[in-house]
Image (cartoon, rainbow, N blue to C red):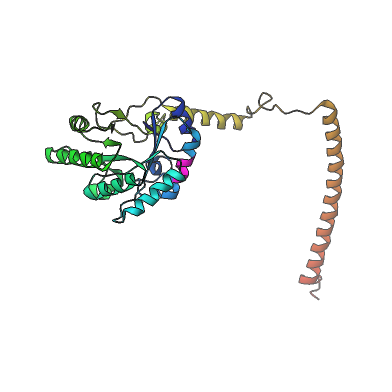
Amino acid sequence: MVTAYDYPSAVHVDRAGVDAVLVGDSCAMVELGFETTQPITLDQMIHHCQAVKRGAPNRPLLVGDMPFGSYEFEDCDVALRNAYRMIKEGGMDAVKFEGGSESRAKVVRHVVDGGVAVLGHVGLTPQAISVLGGFRAQGRTAVRARALLDDALRLQEAGAFGIVLECIPANVATAITDALEIPTIGIGAGGGTSGQVLVFHDLLGMLSHPHHEEFVPKFCKQYARVGVDINNGLAQFKKEVEDGAFPGDQYSPYVMTKKEKIMFEDLLKVDAEKRRSKHEEAASKLKQSDEYEQLNLYGDKNGSR
């Protein structure tokens, strides 16, 4: 699984043969520039889901992240209505919810009963960073690791078809995977999960730069440094435009026939004469207007008005 947030990224992920695409709410950070995932809205998520659907319309499984504030209500029908929007308007095959508490499992059960496939998510749940105290690894104590297992089992019982395990120790992720009948997708959770997911921008080094590196999670391997090529390309374009090297004849492909060129130049000569005549006429009027204003506003040399 790889994230995608727009048409081009979806096309690339689909062509690479990746099994599943997650339209993650991480879009808020890597595409929209927010510091957390919390600000992105349901309408914004649907907008990005639609673009991804157009880029990968048939083969991969498309999962849409339900954004913060779209499903946490005691009235589970709110979550179901919003999940329907992700499916019907966004074109997703399934939705993803964060958290594995009893209340969250109740929501998952209600949405699944309503006919929408749900992917669960436990461990580091970025939407809950206000409660967690930031982007921190989870399950590093025996008690907390056991609680994560309970969360995962609860989501499975509620009908989730799979679970994302984020930023937890590898042995904990393996234990959870072994205990479940449904697949797990790891991100910063070791190699014992059923599959893996990474953010498109992170794994391709989209924000790489020759002089610095934007933040890349410790668990992310960069398979390319696309950002370096982007920076080099933009810098070269700027230089060639400033130097007059671009576009040149090579990239100026649209030409007139010799006959049409001569006719066009004759028209320009006529137009130039008309413009000169109008310019002289306008200049004369302005000069006359200026003299009139001088006489009326300031009087003659003797000060009379």
> Residue 48 lies in magenta, yes or no?
yes
Residue at the far bottom: name it.
304
The quadrant in which residue 161 appears is top left
List x then y, in percent, for residue 198: 34, 32
Q: Which residue is drawn at 22% across and 33% down?
A: 180
Name the side, left or right, on which 104 lies relative to 231.
Answer: left
Say if 162 sits above or below 16 in the image.
Answer: below
**In this rendering, position of residue 263 left or right of residue 140:** right
Give the residue displayed 42% in from the left and 45% down from the top.
86
Magenta includes 269? Answer: no
Of residues 104 and 69, the one nearer the viewer is 104
Front residue of this view, candidates 132 and 42: 42
Q: In the drawing, does residue 279 fall left or right of residue 248?
A: right
Which contiguous range is marked in magenta? Answer: 46-50
| Nearer-the-camera pick, 200 or 251 | 200
Image quarter hosting the C terminus: bottom right
